[in-house]
Image (cartoon, rainbow, N blue to C red):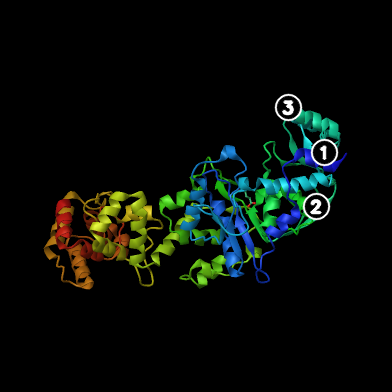
Amino acid sequence: MDNQALAALLFPDITKSIADYEALYPPRDLPDGAVVTRIAPSPTGFVHLGNLYNAIGERLARQTNGVFYLRIEDTDQKREVEGAVEAVIDAMNFYGVKFDEGATVEGETGKYGPYRQRQRKELYQTIAKSLVERGLAYPCFCTEEQLTEMRDEQMANKENIGYYGKYAACRDLTLEQVQEKISAGLPWVLRFRSSGDAEKMIPVQDGIRGELHVQENYTDFVLLKSDGIPTYHFAHVCDDHFMRTTHVIRDESWLATLPIHVQMFDTLGWQRPVYCHTATLMKMDGESKRKLSKRKDPELALSYYRAEGFPPEAVWLYLLTVLNSNFEEWHMANPDANSREFTFSLEKMSSSGALFDLAKLDNIAKDYLSRQSADMVYDGLLAWAKEYDTALAARMEAKADFFRAAISVGRGGDKPRKDYGSWAQAAKFLSFYDSETFVREDECPENVSAEDRKAILTGYLETLNFADTPEEWFAKVKELTEQLGYAVQVKKYKKNPELYKGSIVDVSNLIRVALTGRQNSPDLWEISHVLGEAETRRRIEEYQ
Ligand code: GLU
């Protein structure tokens, strides 16, 4: 076979050489140890949690004065959705992830572009052409039916699956045969001519997993599809080489095709990047663990956390806790430090199915929000409400001081309250303060009869004095409790329940329901002072 003639036949318009691209994209001038990494999402419109997780690379790049960039893997036009690139950029921005270069909403920035793969066709074809010239790639005209037949036969014979050896029907076509088929207008894909041995295991260093041993690739996999656009495998190798990526941080599902990738790097004589395969996000489903699924689990979409209003830092705290073995300890020692101050290392990342658990996120987020200032919570809630609950946003803006005061209740001190972890939860929780949204959700405590209800609330109103200190106020509640035959000490009530109608818990829960609509609430005295005397009296009277 005349490889030069075949290359010219297949790629008549390609005039550049690999050397041209080496000159165009020189090695980056960065300090030793600088990490150059990226996220490379496909513009499907679905930004998932894994995209954020893999954006952990940004922290590595920052720590080493390296580069973090955004590449758009848009080779599959069928799956492309309008506005998807904007959605990725917007989501990353929301989580504080900043790109040094790559695709932007307006276009792109950086010297290693284009950063959208479809604009790099000439580059891929140049590399492909050089492989044809070296006798390492050839056109394949097999139809889908032929390929299915081949697979069926391999399955029936219990043989290795794939296009290789005697099954590689187009491997040894002559130049004339190729010419004939091309003139007849038959579509073709370009395949790599692999000389790999299925019996051989080759070592690959993984930044997270250490040394891996993978089966050598023995299949003649596809480099270019029939429209001349590369497969993920070929594009990844060309792009990460010419964009001078040092670390490829990606999901562990790519481990299966890693043999193809290292074979390409080695064949092209390019230095392999450090592969870092991150653990797939799993969840418990009944008794068993399974992969998070786009179809079944809304929490796989990054938009879920924003819509629920989990603060971005809380999501990061959660992700780092689940995915990094030494993060939790650091966070416990530095509870108020931003997660960005944590020195992140790949070796400490989990390598097997990371268990995802919304209840844990909730706890972390509640703890996080309980440590924030009232101003931060007010601003965060307002920003969320402007997007997801405009009625709340309007009320918050009209009564800013009132909302700030409500948010301040139970905040600060050694044991701040942890009533909400997300803005949606906060909106729900705080709703009782505002008379416009106040509803009584809970019933009067069981131990309190209708008659006592009236007596307690009337007695409460009679002695209520807004000038009292909290201690004076509480002394009056105790007095009222005793007068009406309820136990002031819960212990005493529990010991001899027949001696009392109930305890101080019933009395105060009744006042709680009157005032907040719930049997569970922050400190009643503080709440009353946020509501003001008139509203406090109005609610108690209303419930008498
Ligand atoms: N487009 C691939 C994905 O979304 C990128 C994988 C990679 O980072 O190389 O899974």
Give the secondary structure at mark 1: loop
Seen at 68% across and 43% down, the residue is: 231
Q: Examine the image and state in which quarter residue 372 appears.
A: bottom left
Seen at 49% across and 52% down, the residue is: 106
Seen at 56% across and 62% down, the residue is: 100
Give the secondary structure at mark 3: helix
Picture disc at residue 429: none
Residue 97 located left or right of residue 255? left
Residue at image mark 2: 267
Which of the marked residues, 2 or 1, is nearer the chain's N terminus?
1
Q: Position of residue 80 (x, y in %)?
A: 55, 41
Residue at image mark 1: 164
Q: Nearer the viewer, mark 2 or mark 1?
A: 2
Residue at image mark 3: 145
Classify mark 2 as within 8 Å of ligand 1 or not, answering yes or no: no
Q: Is residue 436 visible?
A: yes
